[in-house]
Structures are given as C-alpha cells and as structure tokens.
Image: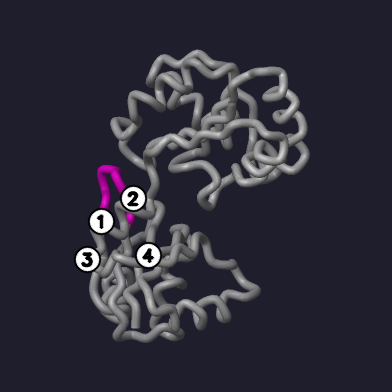
C-alpha cells in the first residue's frame, strides 16, 4: 500500500492524528526533503526510516519503490508541505502503483488551495487551479488564457516572483479584476492583500520586503 500523507503548510498543529499514525506504522517514508521531514518526525516522535523522493530523482527511483511495495511493504509519501502530487512530486509513483495494481490511499489534510480560496472572499462555487506558472516561456500565453476563464482561478507563486505576478495580472488580466494574495497560510505572519489588481499591486509595492509563500486568487471576469 502507498499512502499519500499531507503535512502542514504552516502550523504543525494542523497535522492530523491519522497522518501521525500512518507515518509511524509505515515501513518507509519517502520524503521530498529528508531534512524538512526529519524535523516534522522529531516533533511527533516518529522513528520510521526515510528515503529521498523529489523532483530530481523521481523518474529513476519509481521502479525501486514499486519493487519495495510489491514485497508487501507499506510506504508513506510526504512532501515539504501540503498534499503530495499537488504541485509537488508524487504523480509518477501513484501512476506506477495503479499500473501494477498496488493500492493507493490519500489522507485528507493540509493544502494551501482550499484555505486561500475560502478566505479570499471571491466566488468559490467553481474554481480553476493552475499551480505554478511557467517562469519564462509560455507565461504570457498562460496569463491570457487565465484572463478569459469564466471561473475563479487559484495559483501558487514564490516570494521571488510574486510582485512580477501581480504586475502581470494588471497587464494581462486587468487592473480592475478583484484578486486576493494570501501570504504564509496557517503561519504566524499570515496576511491577505485584497482588492482590485491595481490596489493590491500598490499594497505590495509599499512593503519593505517580500518573504514567504503565496497563493493568488483571481476573480472571474
């Protein structure tokens, strides 16, 4: 059995009892970053062994972990934060499990998408999740596609590109489009910048520095 185990996007108290028990009972934990996961395991007194499983090695390690699963072992996959396979490694291993008739179960739990959408104050009956935008090639085309979607859009952005992203929303989506930029969900410095795109850009340009992880929610036309 392969378990996909969500881990907190901020506050460690967001970890579920079931997630802790699953990590304790697994034969092996596959971790995106063993240092980050090591701190989580230490906090919850989990002593299960770890192996690395990340974007740079997932193609060449899938067969290895499928073999371990076929021996009857239970593996738990975690990423640095949130739900595995959602803008994080996991898809290739899950697909391989299905191809080899190995059961897969994903625990419900932490994700940045739903809290951001819920607290944005923008329509959340339907939404389009875009994940991370291309850094360069295809970025303009992606914005033009987003601008015409008849639904709320949710995307992730890094602190290094968030200001660029908000400027691009003004340019390609429109300065009057309502947006919400949520910083550091579930952490001490959780903050919402909300208004039309021009107003949010002004708020963010006035900040002395920009740090943290961001989720951007864009209203439909």
- Screen quadrant of the C terminus: bottom left
Q: Check the image and report above or below for 86 versus 216.
A: above
The magenta span reads: 183-190
Magenta span includes 33: no
Can you tell which quarter of the image residue 65 is in?
Answer: top right
Mark found first going from the N terminus, 3 or 4: 3
What residue is rendered at 32% in x and 64% in y?
181
- Do labels 1 and 2 touch, CB within 8 Å? yes
Mark found first going from the N terminus, 2 or 3: 3
What residue is rendered at 31% in x and 81% in y?
177
The disc at residue 216 is: 4
Spatial separation of the CA atoms under disc 4 and disc 1: 12 Å
- Do labels 1 and 3 touch, CB within 8 Å? no
The local crowd at label 3, few if under 14, some if 14 to 19, many if 20 or more residues have their Cα within 10 Å, is some
Q: Nearer the viewer, mark 4 or mark 2?
A: 4
Q: Which residue is mark 2?
A: 184
Q: Which residue is mark 1?
A: 191
Spatial separation of the CA atoms under disc 4 and disc 2: 12 Å
Spatial separation of the CA atoms under disc 3 and disc 4: 12 Å
**Residue toward you, 217 or 212:** 217
Q: Nearer the viewer, mark 4 or mark 1?
A: 4
As helix, strand or loop, the secondary structure at mark 1 comes to strand
Mark found first going from the N terminus, 4 or 2: 2
Spatial separation of the CA atoms under disc 2 and disc 3: 17 Å
As helix, strand or loop, the secondary structure at mark 3 comes to loop
Mark found first going from the N terminus, 4 or 1: 1
**Residue toward you, 193 or 125:** 125
Q: Nearer the viewer, mark 2 or mark 3?
A: 3
- Screen quadrant of the N terminus: top right
């Amino acid at each position: 059995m392969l378990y996909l185990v969500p881990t907190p996007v901020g506050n460690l108290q967001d970890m579920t009892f079931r997630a802790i028990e699953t990590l304790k009972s697994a034969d092996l934990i596959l971790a995106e970053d063993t240092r980050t996961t090591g701190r989580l395991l230490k906090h919850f007194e989990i002593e299960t062994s770890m192996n690395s499983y990340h974007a740079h090695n997932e193609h060449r390690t899938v067969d290895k972990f499928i073999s371990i699963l076929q021996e009857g072992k239970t593996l738990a996959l975690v990423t640095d934060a949130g739900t595995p396979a959602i803008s994080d490694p996991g898809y290739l291993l899950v697909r391989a499990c299905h191809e080899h008739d190995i059961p897969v179960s994903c625990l419900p739990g932490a994700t940045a998408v739903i809290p951001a959408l819920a607290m944005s104050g923008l329509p959340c009956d339907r939404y389009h999740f875009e994940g991370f935008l291309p850094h360069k090639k295809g970025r303009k085309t992606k914005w033009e596609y987003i601008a015409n979607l008849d639904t709320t859009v949710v995307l992730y952005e890094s602190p290094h590109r968030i200001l660029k992203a908000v400027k691009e929303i003004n340019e390609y989506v429109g300065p009057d489009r309502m947006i919400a930029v949520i910083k550091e969900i579930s952490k001490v410095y959780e903050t919402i910048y909300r208004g039309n795109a021009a107003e949010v850009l002004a708020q963010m340009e006035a900040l002395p520095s920009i740090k943290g992880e961001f989720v951007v929610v864009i209203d439909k036309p």
